[in-house]
Amino acid sequence: APDVAATADDTDRPAWDTAPDVAATSQEATTIPGIDETQAVVIPPPKGGERPDVPTELPTPMGSPPRPARDLPRPIGADSTSTWSPTPVESTPQPTGELAPIDRVFRDPGPLGQLTQLALLATAAISVAMVVAHIVLNNRLTDYAQTGESVPRVESVQSIIGSWLRPLLIIAVLGVYLVTVVWARRVVANIAVFGKHVPEAALWMWAIPLVNILVLRQHIDSAWRGSDILLRDDPEWNRSPGNWWALGFAALAIATVGVLFYGSIFDGKTVEGSIDSNAYLMIGYSLLGGALLGLVRAISGVIERQHSRARHFV
């Protein structure tokens, strides 16, 4: 008769417990799903009961504090009982957004340059007002030549130009010129801190018309070249291209002087002569506004280049 106890024992076993007892075999085996049992891959157990792919010591994570001096390797020939500490390595300071403390001789051209730019923009606005006033004056002169009327209207515009706009423009040009000269001499003095030296123009050269325009352009170009970080070790740095905005300013400023002078020598006793003279004056004041705007852009370029050079001063 069959062994009822054994049959009952096998019947009561759950479905998941029907696999053969692997521990009872003489050699452990792992059966990979999808492979016939006859092709079972036998993986020998690791020695010592440990997994060979797991390191016994975890690596030091990035950003961890440095090892103390006592744990660092000693130099060859050093006594084990002697005290030894590694030589600290000096770190190179990284450039920041602030100006580096180069020297007391270096003076930041930013504040004075911004003041100069504001004065230039105000002067350019007055020159634009002069252009508009001369356009209105010419229109009223044309009406007067055709109808013989509107004399008070012509005189009112002439009074505004002669009593207000022209004196205000002259004062603005003189004031902005003095501020620009001070700024130009400062930026040229700053490049001496970077190891570049250029002779400054004499003060009397700033007082000669047309010559002072060329001197101002030369100062801007020298500061532009001498502040270039790419030319810090170039002995021919003074032969590099200059600031194109400074060149445009000089060209327009010289043209302004010539056109304004030519427009002022016209005979203003006749209506036709006054209209022609005002037309040339309109052109001259337009050129003046363009020259001032070009100078504003040239000043911005020099300030940015000197700030960049000061941050990366080595």
Image (spheres, rainbow, N blue to C red):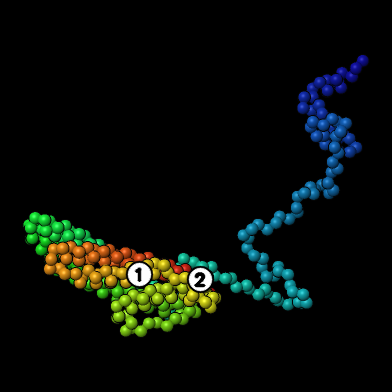
* Residue 23, image x, y percentages: 85, 36
Determine whether, in the image, residue 293 is placed left or right of residue 94. Answer: left
Image quadrant in which you'd find residue 61: bottom right
Determine whether 285 is above or below 106 in the image: above
Which residue is at 13% across, 63% downward?
Answer: 271
Instruction: Identify the residue position indicated by label 2 in the image.
Output: 229
Determine whether, in the image, residue 278 is placed left or right of residue 147. Answer: right
* Residue 284, image x, y percentages: 26, 66
Q: Say the numbered circle drawn on residue 251.
A: 1
Determine whether 57 is above or below 159 in the image: above
Q: Residue furthest right?
A: 1
* Residue 112, image x, y percentages: 34, 72
For marks 1 and 2, give the one nearer the viewer.
Answer: 1
Determine whether, in the image, residue 40 is placed left or right of residue 273. Answer: right
Residues 91 and 204: in front is 204
Determine whether 213 is above or below 40 in the image: below
Which residue is at 41% across, 67% downward?
Answer: 244
